[in-house]
């Protein structure tokens, strides 16, 4: 991209016009040909996926696939069968049945609503059944009515099932309408009403305002840092245009990949942060060159030849880390990787194309409209100022700062060792929300396990094999932790059909979905109960359901994690080895990024699992951590930490090449890049923190994790540990074995671009 950046500097008007043409083309692709976002957790080869595939052939397909929602209501006094309760709820069911995408609403009061409800006609036998057979069928039917009743035993809670045409194509307007009507009706005539279901999960939420808040905070930080309204605005403009193009590409990409519903928000969070940072690094180098007395046009060329190269390398590292998610072989991650990497690519392109053209066109006006506190002109001196003084402080006792920073990060990481992975249930939703109301009512009326039952897909040896099914049901009910099964043993005669060998058993635990005891039950079912029931038979049973998917998801990630780490860390190590022609620098970068990850996950566990400070952040409930959070945070953090490593150490490496003085190189590196790394980290962490107020728990979780990771990585690892460690190790930091001398040389900083520099610390002059 170097040629592109230099062309933008020499032909700024043409470059800006061509950038806007590209921006409009991408915008049209996203708006006119965008695909649908969907959450897909398909895990080929896992037991839960096998169960899901089999269940798709049974009547339990909708419940297990999430193509339904549940309308739940309850009363404290009286029963749900009173006329006043029916008058409140029945109009809701009738209205929901008429909405686009809804095929049927099954009412506990008898009738069904909707044109596509299955019609169950009474089968008349051509010949009278033997009395004993008819008696068995009558008992089974009575047992089925009792076991599957949508009215609780105390008749104070009831529910209706809303069935949709498809779990992935439910119109947003339909889901929002259901939530709005439930919220409006809740409390009417003393009836408490809620609704939940995967298809309603994102309905009724306000769009996150994190972008606007993050931009506002970034403007304030940039004004304080540059003291210029124009300079503060340029990184924002550059990042916003790159982000807009990136998000349009994300929407377009949804035609070819399964892109999660929260992927655009996550991509916006990452893209806005790195986009502002990349523009900031280039603008800061331009500012330094202008303050050193260089011609504005030459200053722009210097900035793209130095910081611009660093931006390209850093952005490429982030993209490689994100695309490394493809090695996991999970479609869900592929969509997230594509969404985030496309956004990073576009903000990087904006920084090395659009921004240089603007700087070339504006010249010194890019630093205009100065603030009152910055009107006094200062000359740039690489070895002067607070950062050089800070570097000297570190170098007096480098071992102390290195060990102290490491211990601090390790203490922050302690909670990580108690992490529980899983998908949180609706008990963590805000109190009074439709999903939380529905969860609480179902738990009160039908037991906590009713909010997350297991679905067991059973392949019978033959059709009408009642003995095999009855034996399995008995074993399941006798398993500790099982509340009940549907069908029950009494329902077996009507649970098999003459031509079907696949049937479904719903297993309701005694505990809530995210309870550790429920996870233990899954293990017992898979390792003990079902294998024992299958022994000596050709019957096969597979456990599915939300908790089973979580367990399988976690196991798949655990199995693929070593390969992922080897690919991402290995490629990063090789890239840094080539860049710095050193083995210790990339090793330090890789190890310290793992320390940052541990600290970030430790803080995340302390807040979202232990509940420390949860109220301050608006976390409505604690529980397990999303299984994909650690690996996603690492992919993002590794790229970002390499950004800071590159921007900071590249200045040190430049000075080491020129002077062969390790101490001087560290101080000049801090003086040249320490300030901008601190500003960049402050901006990026602010962008991530700005997404925490969103009601979306997934984004809130990522906001805390990524903000913590950036703060720890920049202010503890890069600005304390790395310079201290390099000062402590000394010249061997830059050692490269002779047998690696064939590696290509990459000049991150343009040769001869610096000014005459004099170290003003007599105690350190000449310390080679």
Image: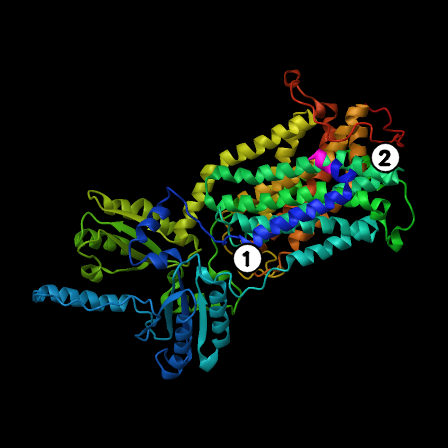
Q: Name the image quarter holding the N terminus.
A: top right
Task: Answer left or right for 711 relative to 247.
Answer: right
Which residue was labeled with disc 2? Answer: 383
Residue at position x 41%, y 45% in the image = 43
N-term-proximal mark, 2 vs 1:
2
Mark 1, Cα crowd under 10 Å, few <14 / some 14-19 / many 20+, is many
Magenta stretch secondary structure, dominant: helix
Percent coordinates x, y for residue 100 in the rendering: 43, 67
> Quarter-wise, where is residue 666 in the image?
top right
Estimate the x, y position of residue 638 in percent, counting from the top left: 61, 39
Residue found 72% across the figure and 27% down from its top: 729
Residue under numbered circle 1: 697
Q: Nearer the viewer, residue 756 or 674?
A: 756
**Residue appearing at x 37%, y 70% in the figure:** 159
Instruction: State which region is magenta.
Output: 1-5
Residue 383, image quadrant: top right
| Residue 725 in sight | yes
Q: Residue at x 66, y 16 (%)?
A: 738
Q: Nearer the viewer, residue 407 or 673?
A: 673
Image quadrant in which the C terminus is located: top right
Q: Label 2's element?
A: loop
């Amino acid at each position: 991209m170097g040629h592109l950046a230099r062309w933008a500097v020499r032909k700024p008007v043409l470059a800006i016009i061509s950038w806007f043409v590209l921006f409009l083309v991408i915008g049209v692709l996203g708006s006119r040909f965008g695909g649908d976002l969907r959450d897909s957790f398909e895990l080929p080869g896992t037991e839960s996926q096998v169960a899901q595939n089999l269940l798709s052939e049974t009547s339990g397909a909708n419940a297990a696939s999430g193509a339904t929602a549940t309308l739940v209501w309850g009363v404290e006094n009286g029963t749900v069968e009173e006329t006043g309760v029916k008058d409140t709820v029945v109009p809701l069911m009738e209205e929901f049945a008429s909405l686009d995408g809804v095929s049927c609403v099954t009412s506990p009061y008898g009738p069904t609503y909707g044109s596509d409800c299955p019609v169950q006609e009474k089968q008349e036998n051509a010949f009278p059944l033997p009395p004993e057979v008819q008696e068995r069928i009558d008992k089974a039917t009575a047992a089925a009515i009792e076991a599957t009743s949508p009215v609780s035993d105390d008749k104070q809670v009831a529910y209706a099932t809303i069935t949709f045409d498809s779990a992935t194509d439910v119109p947003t307007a339909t889901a929002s309408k259901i939530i709005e009507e439930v919220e409006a009706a809740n409390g009417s005539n003393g009836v408490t009403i809620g609704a939940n279901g995967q298809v309603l999960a994102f309905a009724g939420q306000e769009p996150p305002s994190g972008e606007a808040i993050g931009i506002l905070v970034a403007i304030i930080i940039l004004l304080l840092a540059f003291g210029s309204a124009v300079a503060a605005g340029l990184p924002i403009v550059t990042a916003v245009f790159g982000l807009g193009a990136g998000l349009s590409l994300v929407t377009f990409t949804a035609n070819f990949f399964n892109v999660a519903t929260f992927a655009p928000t996550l991509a916006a969070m990452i893209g806005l942060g790195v986009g502002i940072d990349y523009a900031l690094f280039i603008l800061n180098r331009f500012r330094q060159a202008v303050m050193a007395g260089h011609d504005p046009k030459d200053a722009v060329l210097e900035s793209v030849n130095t910081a611009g190269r660093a931006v390209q390398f850093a952005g490429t590292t982030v993209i490689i880390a994100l695309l490394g998610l493809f090695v996991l072989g999970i479609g869900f991650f592929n969509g997230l990787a594509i969404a985030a990497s496309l956004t990073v690519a576009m903000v990087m392109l904006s920084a090395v194309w659009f921004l240089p053209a603007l700087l070339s066109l504006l010249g010194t006006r890019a630093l205009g409209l100065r603030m009152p506190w910055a009107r006094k002109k200062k000359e740039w001196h690489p070895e002067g100022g607070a950062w050089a003084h800070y570097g000297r402080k570190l170098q007096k006792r480098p071992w102390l700062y290195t060990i102290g920073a490491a211990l601090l990060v390790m203490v922050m990481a302690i909670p990580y060792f108690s992490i529980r992975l899983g998908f949180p249930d609706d008990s963590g939703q805000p109190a009074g929300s439709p999903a939380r109301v529905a969860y609480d009512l179902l738990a009160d009326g039908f037991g906590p396990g009713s909010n997350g039952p297991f679905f067991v897909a059973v392949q019978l040896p033959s059709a009408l094999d009642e003995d095999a099914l009855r034996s399995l049901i008995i074993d399941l009910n006798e398993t500790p932790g099982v509340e009940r099964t549907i069908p029950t043993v009494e329902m077996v005669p009507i649970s098999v059909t003459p031509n079907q060998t696949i049937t479904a058993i719903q297993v309701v635990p005694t505990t809530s979905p995210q309870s550790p005891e429920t996870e233990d039950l899954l293990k017992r079912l898979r390792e003990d109960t079902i294998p024992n029931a299958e022994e000596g038979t050709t019957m096969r049973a597979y456990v599915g359901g939300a908790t089973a998917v979580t367990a399988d998801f976690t196991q798949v990630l655990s199995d693929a994690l070593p390969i992922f780490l080897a690919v991402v860390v290995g490629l990063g190590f090789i890239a840094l080895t080539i860049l710095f022609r050193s083995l210790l620098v990339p090793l330090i970068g890789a190890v310290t990024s793992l320390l940052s990850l541990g600290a970030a996950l430790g803080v995340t566990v302390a807040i979202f699992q232990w509940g420390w400070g949860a109220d301050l952040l608006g976390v409505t409930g604690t529980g397990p951590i999303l299984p994909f959070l650690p690996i996603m945070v690492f992919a993002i953090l590794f790229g970002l930490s390499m950004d800071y490593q590159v921007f900071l150490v590249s200045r040190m490496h430049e000075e080491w090449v020129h002077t062969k003085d390790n101490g001087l190189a560290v101080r000049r590196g801090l003086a040249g890049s320490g300030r901008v790394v601190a500003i960049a980290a402050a901006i990026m962490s602010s962008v991530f923190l700005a997404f925490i107020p969103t009601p979306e728990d997934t984004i809130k979780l990522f906001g805390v994790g990524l903000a913590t990771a950036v703060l720890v990585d920049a202010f503890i690892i890069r600005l304390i540990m790395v310079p201290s460690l390099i000062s402590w190790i000394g010249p061997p930091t830059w050692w490269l074995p002779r047998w690696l001398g064939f590696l290509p040389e990459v000049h991150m900083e343009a040769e001869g671009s610096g000014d005459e520099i004099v170290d003003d610390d007599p105690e350190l002059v000449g310390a080679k």
